[in-house]
Amino acid sequence: MAPLAISADGQSSEAGIRQALGADSLPVLIDEFESDQDVRRLKGIIRLARSASSADDAMVFKGTPEGSAMRFTLSSAFFFSAINPRGLSWPAPIEWSGWNVSS
């Protein structure tokens, strides 16, 4: 899919995806976004997707070990694929309202 999209595996992290996007507005395709993985990591990726799809141009700031801030303006579409996406409701529910979840 490169250079037209970022194709990632479900083991990817929020930081890795954000850094891969950089200043680009490429669509992000994530396969194997399964419920048997670290739910906190998956929630971070979903927060990133929500920020990237919001209508405003708000900046996202992340701190660095050196004490300086990194800034990101996110504007990308995300596509998640998984065999068992609804299983993501346990043990920590993920809010899917506003998302198109097909089975």
Image (cartoon, helix red, strand yellow):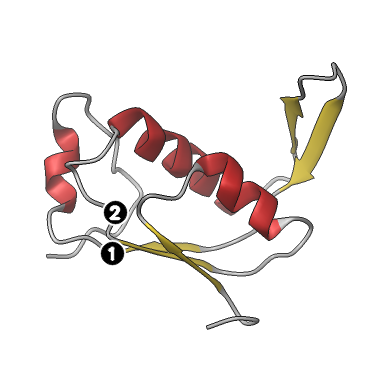
| Residue 63 in sight here | yes
**Looking at the image, do the residues carrying marks 2 and 1 touch, with CB atoms under 8 Å apart?**
yes
Q: Earlier in the sequence, mark 2 or mark 1?
A: 2
Is 38 displayed left or right of 64 in the figure?
Answer: left
Is 62 displayed left or right of 6 in the figure?
Answer: right
In the picture, which quadrant includes the C terminus? bottom left
Q: Position of residue 89 (x, y in %)?
A: 16, 34
Q: Position of residue 97 (x, y in %)?
A: 30, 43
Q: Is residue 98 above or below residue 78?
A: above
- The answer for how far apart the CA atoms under marks 2 and 1 are is 6 Å
Q: Position of residue 8 (x, y in %)?
A: 46, 63
Looking at the rendering, which quadrant does residue 42 occupy?
Answer: top left
> Looking at the image, which residue sits at the far top?
67
- Mark 2 residue crowding within 10 angstroms, few (<14) / some (14–19) / many (20+): many
| Residue 54 in sight here | no
Q: Nearer the viewer, residue 86 or 19?
A: 19
Which residue in the structure is indicated by mark 1? 81
Residue type highlighted by circle 1: Ser
Q: Nearer the viewer, residue 67 or 23?
A: 67
- SS for tag 1? loop
User: Which of the labelled discs sits on residue 36, or is there none?
Assistant: none
Which residue is drawn at the image coordinates 43% and 43% (left, top)?
A: 46
Looking at the rendering, which quadrant does residue 40 occupy?
Answer: top left
- SS for tag 2? loop
Which residue in the structure is indicated by mark 2? 33
Is 93 displayed left or right of 12 in the figure?
Answer: left
Which residue is drawn at the image coordinates 58% and 47% (left, top)?
A: 16
Residue type highlighted by circle 2: Phe
